[in-house]
Image (tube, rainbow, N blue to C red):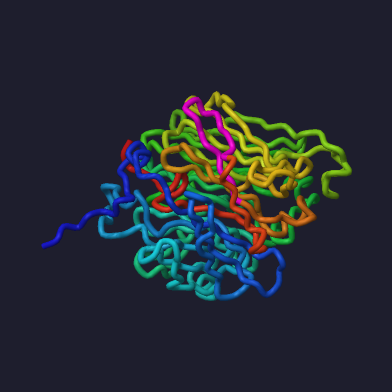
Amino acid sequence: MPLIQPDPTFYPSAREAMLAPREELAYVALLDASGGDRPDGLATIDLADGSIVDVHDMPVPGDELHHFGWNVCSAALCPYAPHPHVERRYLIVPGLRSSRIHVFDVKGDPRHPKLVKTIEPETLFEKTGYSRPHTVHCGTDAIYVSALGDVAGEAPGGVFTLDHETFEPTGRWESERGPQRLHYDFWWHLGHDTMITSEWGTPNQIEAGPSLDLLVAREYGHRLHVWDLAKRRHLQEIDLGDQHQMALELRPSHDPTKTYGFVNTVINVEDLSANIFTWYLEDGVWKARKTITIPAEPADPALLPEPLKQFGAVPPLVTDISLTLDDRILLLSAWGTGELKAYDVSDPFAPRETGSIRIGGIARRDAHPAAPGRALNGGPQIVEASRDGRRVYFTNSLYRSWDDVFYPDGISGWMAKVDVADDGSISLDPAFFVDFAADGRRAHQIRLQGGDSSSDSYCFP
């Protein structure tokens, strides 16, 4: 009888995952910016030279591909819910605007993913009551997907699950929602049976672009929610302060014995700063503390888009963060100012900046060494670190309608890379620059072959 061997890309701990072979390929979502008849695409990038080796177009236009993820990951090795027979084989790719979900098989030919299943929006609506699927995480018992709203584009948003084998929606995850209404990201502390969720806004609040009225009224999300992961029950709400609008990406510690993590808030309506909060468990109560503030930068109003001219400043707009697997370096993408920043967060309550690079930006338009003299639009947005924490890849598009407000001249898609030194400093790789200008679509989510810093969760320290 043959032995069942777990997928070799599964690791019981983040420490062991850091010893994994170097990533060879990246998968990148390409977004149609025309709003016309062209579909989005899934690009395969050879990371040895930055070449585009394949682009698979979606079957129909209008998806706005977003935060896709793997069907399974290292969580499959958790002792209470082992699935040693499953493989990290499929990419689950949600369309945020269409509510359609695509499933790609990368096993036969990783350089050329094959579309094997599409879940139509009507199926999602019927089985979950949710719409606008956003983020995919592989759990111990199912594939978890966040959704920004209900079928009408209003609250509540939440989490639904897909079957590991068939990929069919199995229903809403929440059994007792409590006060939670807005939704964005989610992740968990598996060792403590706890889920954390964050807030952006309803689909009807975000799909037309950012609203100054909603910002001034402080109506975007600004809370974290704590859940009992097994009972699917809301436990606690943490208000970060309504001035801190749009609480987005959640990055818990990879060590399952720890009970802290980081979340970014995009804009403080009182001073245009962006902020990082550290959440933590203390005496049985979950709390959050502001630990990083990135101020707005003065700029010539003539260089600013209309909503920012009155302020004479560029907000950092920290829209994504990535935590290395050793829980040591936190990367922040300041999409507005065109900066990627690195912090040593060995002490999660006292981050220390270790480096920064500049590329793009609303007012600066800094060039890349591989494209000297070319004013780049967009800025570091999606950011993803390799398993060993030595390489960080990033792309420059946020969301079509929001791109068009902050970069009204349009965004030409690109992907770049920084290298991380022993001391946490970062340097732009002068030779790595993936230019999607010829394709004409914008680059968003990145996934690395075999896993990356935000794809897996672990049950062992």
In magenta stretch: residue 424: yes
The chief SS type of the magenta part is: strand
Judge whether 173 appears above or below 300 on screen: below
Q: Position of residue 171 (x, y in %)?
A: 45, 66
Judge whether 400 appears above or below 23 on screen: below
What is the magenta range?
415-429
- Decide if residue 246 is on the left or right side of residue 387: right
- Decide if residue 213 is on the left or right side of residue 141: right
**Where on the picture, by quarter, is residue 294?**
top right
Q: Position of residue 172 (x, y in %)?
A: 47, 62
Judge whether 382 appears above or below 168 on screen: above
For the point 44% across and 47% down, which residue is it?
452
- Decide if residue 315 is on the left or right side of residue 139: right
Quadrant occupied by the N terminus? bottom left
For the point 61% across and 56% down, which residue is it?
443
Q: Position of residue 145 (x, y in %)?
A: 49, 58
Quadrant occupied by the C terminus? top left
Q: Position of residue 95 (x, y in %)?
A: 57, 65
For the point 51% across and 34% down, which residue is it?
420
For the point 55% across and 29% down, which residue is it?
425
